[in-house]
Image (spheres, rainbow, N blue to C red):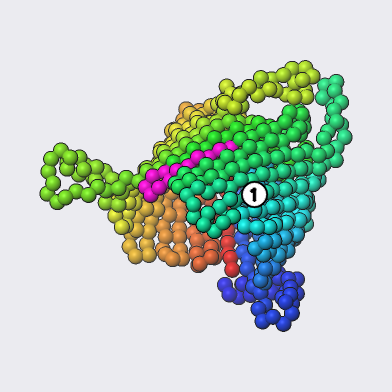
Amino acid sequence: MKTLRFLITTLMLAPLAVLGQFGGQNSDPGSVTGNVSLIWQSYAEDSLIGAQVPPEQSALNAWANLIYTKGNFSAGVRYEAYQNALLGYPGRFKGQGIAYRFARYRTDQYDVTIGNFYDQLGSGLIFRSYEERYLGVDNAMDGLRVVFRPINGIQLKGIYGRQRLDFDSRLINGEGVVRAADAEVNFNQFKEDWASKKLQVTLGGSFVSRFQTGSQIEKDTLVLEVPENVAAYAGRANIYYGNWNLYAEYVRKINDPNADNDYIYREGEGIFANLSYSKPGFGFNLNGKMVDNMSFRSDRDLLLFDAPINFIPAITKVHTYNLAATLYPYATVIDGETGFNVEVFKKFKRKDLPEGATGFGASMKRFYNAIVGKYGTNVTVNFAAANNIDTTGFSGVEGAVQGYRRNSLGFGDEKFVRDLNVEISRKFSKNFKAKYTFYYLEFNTNTTPVTVDFKGIVYANMHVLELNNRLAKHHSLRTELQTLFTEQDKGDWGTVLFEYSYSPHWFVSVMDQYNFGNEDPDARVHYLFGTIGYINGPHRLAVGYGKRREGIFCVGGVCRAVPASNGFEITFTSSF
């Protein structure tokens, strides 16, 4: 691995080596860090699951970051290769070359970046530039970013540039220019003794503007001018008081006719609030969100993943178990939705009981201790709900221009999702622990189109049992038993996963996803996939083979469709 590190550094970082002269005869030559990741997949015909086979029969996605740092200065590049891109990935990502490059100088007072960068203002409702490479999402800014802290507690930020849109052996930016300014004040940093106060208050405000050339659009008999400059602004507050935390943000966008809203001129608006409380053994979290016409892109004519300026998070909990995460994952409805999420966590600890205690109270304590066990029991309850926004549609000219009127901040009449999940985990011994999770789901496949076989509300119950067993020194086995029961869509599913680890380096896993409740007997297919892998510190290599179901892959409420496949898969990640 040291040889690999040396070769990569020598071959790929040669252009940056000149930067080692930065500082003249200084004995510190600086340092180089980086990471590499790749996915290679082969494709074989499988008519049973409808697996597609591209002409090249295999595909490769690869990324490598190299960063040189010397004192306050850093510079880096990211090499990307798509030979060709994996199926389901944006087909326009092709070729190989430098897709990301930057230079940055920062001190306690200044922070200046030229080239590519990621950033977020507030919760991201008004601006978020980020990368999620396994979804094919990357809206990196390409331009200038300046952060200035004139005194302790005040931070000013300016952003100017274009967003990454595409990659064809070179970086291709979108058409629009994005300008942003942000100011944040942390009152507790003004005086040294305020930093330890129970009350902590931070206020912030943002302004974002997009420029894109435009002319006119025609709607029915109307000819309308397209605004070339579209602005959005936001205000936010983050308040801590002891164990409590309140975060609230309001954002508004002026008229922005675009492909997402069918080119209406209605202004956009969004509200996000979070209230949480935590102490050892107990905590709760309450989220509320309303977004109305808040799709904001640097190109008004684009859709889906292309050139989003902002990010609207999903209101539901991010699920990780196979059935819950891949069959009905909820994604934000960017046209407009209102919803809330509440989660309560409690750790039930074993109660002290004097030896030889008798009576009803002692009997109840013994019963309680038998339930929670020696190590205690953790219980988490989460519930999320989202509907469309409460609106009344306009007709005629007003409908063509303004679209609709929002009547309240509350729910509209169309249900998007109901997601209840209860998680109970308990450690039974030093070598064995278990977790049971129950899910109840009501999921609208019209607004989140995760399936083409059913349109409407899917009602589903899911049960997941995860067992972790330390068999012997270095040997452990993790088992997942999952079922999903529904009378809609493709019917009932089951998933079984066995993962054996021989620490610290080796692991082997086998997973079978089975649609045993499908009304079509020919569609009751076993999606069997096996993996063997090797881990050595920050380096991980895995080789897998088997079938993958056509479905949806989501990260943080952003999803992309994944086609069915049958074949080998190799993944490799490394950092140095």
Percent across and percent down for residue 22 are: 74, 75
Reading the image, the residue beneath label 1 is 184
**Residue in the picture at 56% in, 52% down:** 188
Residue 83: image quadrant is bottom right
Q: Please give left or right for residue 126 compared with residue 547 in the image.
A: right
Residue 364: image quadrant is top left
Q: The residue under label 1 is which amino acid type?
A: Glu
Q: Please give left or right for residue 354 compared with residue 135 in the image.
A: left
Instruction: Answer above or below: position of 20 versus 133.
Output: below
Percent across and percent down for residue 308 are: 70, 43
**Residue in the picture at 75% in, 59% down:** 114
Instruction: Answer above or below: position of 125 versus 505.
Output: above
Instruction: Answer above or below: position of 24 versus 472.
Output: below
**Residue in the picture at 48% in, 45% down:** 241
Magenta-tinted stretch? 272-283
Magenta stretch containing residue 280, yes or no?
yes
Instruction: Answer above or below: position of 56 versus 550.
Output: below
**Residue in the picture at 33% in, 59% down:** 471
Magenta stretch containing residue 353, yes or no?
no
* Magenta stretch prevailing secondary structure: strand
Percent across and percent down for residue 440 are: 44, 33
Residue 78 in view of the camera: no
Mark 1 secondary-structure assignment: strand
Q: Please give left or right for residue 348 compared with residue 86 in the image.
A: left
